[in-house]
């Protein structure tokens, strides 16, 4: 007699993707964050969300202080796992969340920490910007606009949304 086991894996996704602290609330900005730079997820996978990071990684504010608190780190890693495991689902969830009236005219800061770690992920953000033209987006990145494929992606689609790319800020 054989026994078949059905294994179901329950994945908890963040209920809300965009967050605000008190400072951001005052100026009407919402955050999307990933864990900064390199690390290991609870399931053993390793990651590097800042593949273009240089010396900034040594002094990165997002690798110290409150960002290392377990609850904060867990939230950022849950965000990353959502992106890694189900990019299309995450993109749809982000577009849906941004459909709330409060985001019309609001500013979204892509990456309080972390960066556009892959072209597919960057493309997802560009599509999100295009889907929500009434929302403003900005991002700092170490993947500079004049570097190869990323540059082409941005140039082709900059008109679709108000995403702004700039050199990643130095630690505050
Ligand atoms: S400063 Fe930015 S790019 Fe550099 S390690 Fe920190 S989050 Fe990543």
Image (spheres, rainbow, N blue to C red):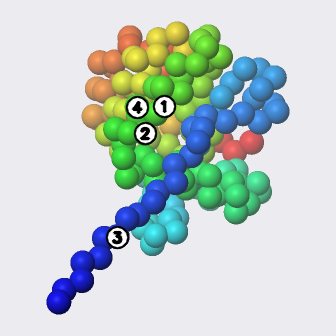
Whole-angstrom CA distance, mark 1 to mark 2, is 6 Å
Q: Secondary structure at mark 2?
A: helix
Inter-mark Cα distance, 3 to 4: 27 Å
Residue 12 in the image: above or below residue 20? below
Asked if residue 59 can be seen in this view, the reply is: no
Q: Could you tell whether 1 is left or right of 18 in the image? A: left
Q: Position of residue 37 (x, y in %)?
A: 53, 55
- Report the Cα–Cα distance between label 2 and label 4: 5 Å
Q: Are marks 2 and 4 in contact (CB under 8 Å)?
A: yes
Q: Is residue 108 left or right of residue 89?
A: right
Residue 153: x percent and y percent?
31, 27
Density class for disc 3 (Cα within 10 Å; few <14, some 14-19, many ≥20) is few
| Viewer-closest of 123 and 153 | 123
Q: Mark 3 — residue?
A: 7
Q: Determine the residue positioned at 34% across, 32% down.
A: 123
Count of picture labels: 4
Q: For numbered disc 4, what is the local secondary structure?
A: helix
Residue 83 percent location from the top left of the image = 42, 46
Which is in the foreground here, disc 2 or disc 3? Answer: 3
Q: Quadrant of residue 109?
A: top right
Residue at image location 66% in from the left, 28% down from the top: 30
Queried on whether the Cβ of the residue with tag 2 lies below 8 angstroms from ligand 1, the answer reads no
* Marks 1 and 2 in Cβ contact (< 8 Å): yes
CB atoms of marks 4 and 1 within 8 Å: yes
Q: Which mark is residue 90?
A: 2
**Residue with the most extreme front position:** 1
User: Along the polypeptide, which appears first: circle 3 or circle 4?
Assistant: 3
Label 1 crowding class (10 Å Cα cut-off): few <14, some 14-19, many 20+? some
Residue designated by label 4: 92
Q: From the viewer's perspective, is 129 left or right of 23?
A: left
Point out the tag, 2 or 3, that comes first from the N-terminus.
3
**Residue that badge 1 annotates:** 94
């Amino acid at each position: 007699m054989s026994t078949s086991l059905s294994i179901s894996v329950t994945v908890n996704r963040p209920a809300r993707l965009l967050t605000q602290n008190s400072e951001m609330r005052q100026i009407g900005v919402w955050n999307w964050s990933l864990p900064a730079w390199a690390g290991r997820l609870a399931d053993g996978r390793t990651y590097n969300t800042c593949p273009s990071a240089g010396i900034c990684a040594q002094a990165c504010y997002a690798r110290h202080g409150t960002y290392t608190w377990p609850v904060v780190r867990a939230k950022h890693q849950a965000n990353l796992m959502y992106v890694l495991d189900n990019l299309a689902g995450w993109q749809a969830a982000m577009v849906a969340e941004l459909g709330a009236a409060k985001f019309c005219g609001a500013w979204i800061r892509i990456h309080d920490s972390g960066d556009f770690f892959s072209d597919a992920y960057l493309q997802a953000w560009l599509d999100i910007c295009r889907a929500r033209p009434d929302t403003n987006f900005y991002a700092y990145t170490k993947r500079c606009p004049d570097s190869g494929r990323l540059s082409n992606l941005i140039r082709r689609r900059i008109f679709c949304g108000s995403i702004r790319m700039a050199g990643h800020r130095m630690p505050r």
